[in-house]
Image (cartoon, rainbow, N blue to C red):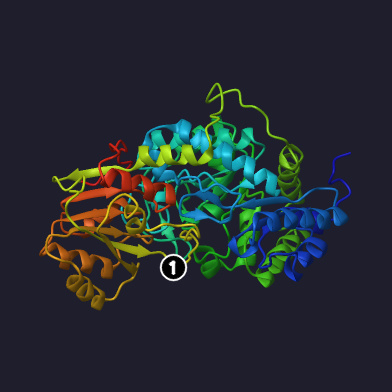
Amino acid sequence: MRPWDNFTLEQKVGQLFMCGFHGQRADAQITRLIQDYHVGGVIYFRRNVESVEQLTRLSAELQRMAAKSSELPLMISVDQEGGMVARIDKDGVTRVPGNMALGATGNPDYTYQCARILGDELKRIGIDMNLAPVLDVNNNALNPVIGVRSYGENAEKVAAHGAAAITGYQSRGIAATAKHFSGHGDTAVDSHLGMVTVPHGRERLEQVELLPFRQAIEAGVDAIMTAHVIFPAIEPEPIPATLSRSVLHGLLRKEMGFEGIIITDCLEMHAISKPYGVAKAAVRAVKAGADLILVSHTLDEQIAAIEAVAEAVRHGEIDEQIIDQALERVVNWKLKRCGDQPSEPSSMTDSFSSVPHDVLLHEIACQSITVVHNDGLLPLKPEQNVFVIWPEVVQRTEVDEPWSHSDSLGRVLGQFRNHVREYKITTQPSYDEAERIMQSVIKGDQVIVCTYTSAGVLPKGQRNIIERLSEKHSLIVVALRNPYDLFEIPRPGAYVCTYENTPAVVRGLSLLITGELNPSGSLPVRLS
């Protein structure tokens, strides 16, 4: 007898939902969803995390609760992509580099090692699924939501790093989730905020957007997450991939042969919730071929979506066989991964690196930092003063989460040499800030301006500061996140890309600036 043969319709449907909640313990929201609505999965965000120890206890508490109402365990997931998207921001979880930093090293084995490290740590916390890696090919400089979450703009390299990450995670018993199918890289709109279209023909999609996902399937990826993006070459109706049977069933299942779990991106994102509504979208996603429906935040929306799918089955809008097929894939995944112990890999590398994590992170940081051009300003001249402008990331978004253990360049650089001054700004500085900075810089200072862009285009206040300073000084500009910042500013005397502002990167940057490190990173995107 199969585990779900005696399930009621409500139990079957509940198993096809993954939901978030707002507490650091099992609050009323998640308790109701598990006990009354039989949800099969939970997703963690930073709001759920106080410490690694607390999160481990929470995972156990949720599993005990699930065991009382079902013989199936929960699937517990998290978006722990690395770099600037890391939901677990606490000691005990390694801050692995983000995708574009790894892409800049040109070494997929680094990606594999980071996935193994993170996989071990997530497993100990009670997490069985990571909603990573991002396999979007970022070839649009204005992309506000992918950017450095991508390994780069070359599809073959993205595919190689993605396969390495998948192998690394799954060797440690963690389900990897390739996202966002069929590709969110060539967009200039954030689907959290509105509808997005990738208008390219099928030949181009095959060469770029689809290639990394084909390789992920060959690598045995457990799950693929859908994109709330319209692909006219695949789906003639103006509907996003998440709701398209042509995309999910026709392309992904039939043509590409994917047999794992198809999970939606969160249905509360505005690209779905505004034109369709969460409940109606859940019904359409199931009909399109999705196995697991993600609703991350709002209890009323979560309940409405679950009830809408069950009601659609009762009224014949959804054939119950579709529910059974999705449930079988979810249950098979749970039997495979939940509680699974890591196994030694048979590919990627003969032996896993035994170097300490901080040594590995430093090595990767030093291999990723990229000097785009240098008109003789690097390394710094030891006899001159240094003035650093450092943007502090204080605003948290879905794709931009400040790391609590952070260092500024001025502070770290001051450990290597004397006469370093630093002026800290926000990522959205006022125009008055430029005037105060102009008055602070002394003639003869070596000026380093660090930029930080998380939404596609360098904020106007940061651009104004660089424009003002460029009138009187030859600048060293360091792009701490988005390499495309170069498009927005006068050509500086030196331009360096780090792809993230993690402590390992800041220390590596200090070594490069002082001449103790020869740069070896290569741009994963074109800046011409």
Q: Residue furthest bottom?
A: 432
Secondary element type, mark 1: loop
How far across and down, in percent of the image, does residue 3 sit? 85, 43
Q: Looking at the picture, tell me which residue is in the foreground, 311 or 51.
A: 51
How far across and down, in percent of the image, does residue 274 sit? 52, 70
Q: Quadrant of the N terminus?
A: top right
In the image, taking residue 526 as reference, residue 146 lies left or right, namely right
| Amino acid type, mark 1 | Val
Residue 376 lies in quadrant: top left
In the image, taking residue 92 as reference, residue 413 lies left or right, namely left
- Identify which residue is drawn at 48% across, 63% down: 192
From this viewpoint, is residue 254 visible? no
From this viewpoint, is residue 330 visible? yes
464 shown above or below 382: below
- Identify which residue is drawn at 34% across, 48% down: 498
Q: For mark 1, what is the residue?
A: 394
- Identify which residue is drawn at 57% across, 65% down: 268
